[in-house]
Image (spheres, rainbow, N blue to C red):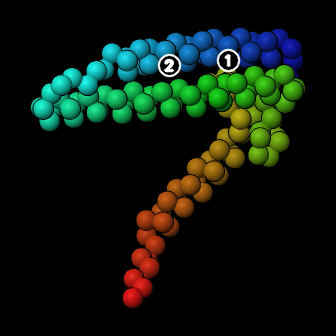
Amino acid sequence: MDRMKLFDYRRRLTDERVRVIRSINRNRSAADDIRVEHTEDEGDLAIISHDRALLYDLNQTDLGWLKAIREAVDRIDRDEYGECLNCCEDIDEQRLTAVPWVGLCLRCQEQIETDRVSERYLAANAEPEPPEF
């Protein structure tokens, strides 16, 4: 991949990193604003619990993105950016343009997702173990 494209991908990744960090900071600030009030109202407690869980999930998602962005920048530094981490083939540039932190080619990504769905299907339809007496 030529240097100008790599420079553009690094810039986009850096911009996305800044956006994700801002999102994490907003979520942390919002979590700090949620105070458990001295209330006996189950509805209020449920709302507080739901809001905290939602902010936690958002934060976990953002942290995952941040890790993927950091790994993509590291691949640029190692001159491995644009290579599939699974099969080592080139990742299509349209895919990199759409999702610059992606590390897998479309074929490998689809295979992994198919395997996950199959594993969940098998687990959901597995015969339960008979109880031991």
Q: Nearer the viewer, mark 1 or mark 2?
A: 2
Residue 124: x percent and y percent? 43, 65
The answer to whether 68 is drawn above or below residue 26 in the figure is below
Quarter assignment of residue 119: bottom right
Residue, x 78% and y 25% (percent of image)? 74
Residue 69 placement, left or right of 123: right
Residue kind at label 2, given as amino acid type: Ile
Task: Tell which residue pokes out farthest to the front in this image.
Answer: 38
Q: Dividing the image into 4 quarters, which one contains the N terminus?
A: top right
Compare residues 63 and 124 and report the one nearer the observer: 63
Asked if residue 85 can be seen in this view, the reply is yes
Residue 34: x percent and y percent? 30, 20
Compare residues 1 and 44 and report the one nearer the observer: 44
Q: Dividing the image into 4 quarters, which one contains the C terminus?
A: bottom left
Residue 17: x percent and y percent? 62, 16
**Residue with the mark numbered 1:** 13
The answer to whether 92 is drawn above or below residue 8 in the figure is below
**Residue with the mark numbered 2:** 24
Query: Of the numbered discs in the image, which one, if any, rests on residue 25?
Result: none
Residue, x 33% and y 15% (percent of image)? 33
Residue, x 44% and y 19% (percent of image)? 28
- Tell me the crowding category of disc 2: few under 14, some 14 to 19, or many 20 or more residues within 10 angstroms, Cα based: many
Quarter assignment of residue 39: top left
Quarter assignment of residue 37: top left
Compare residues 82 and 30 and report the one nearer the observer: 30
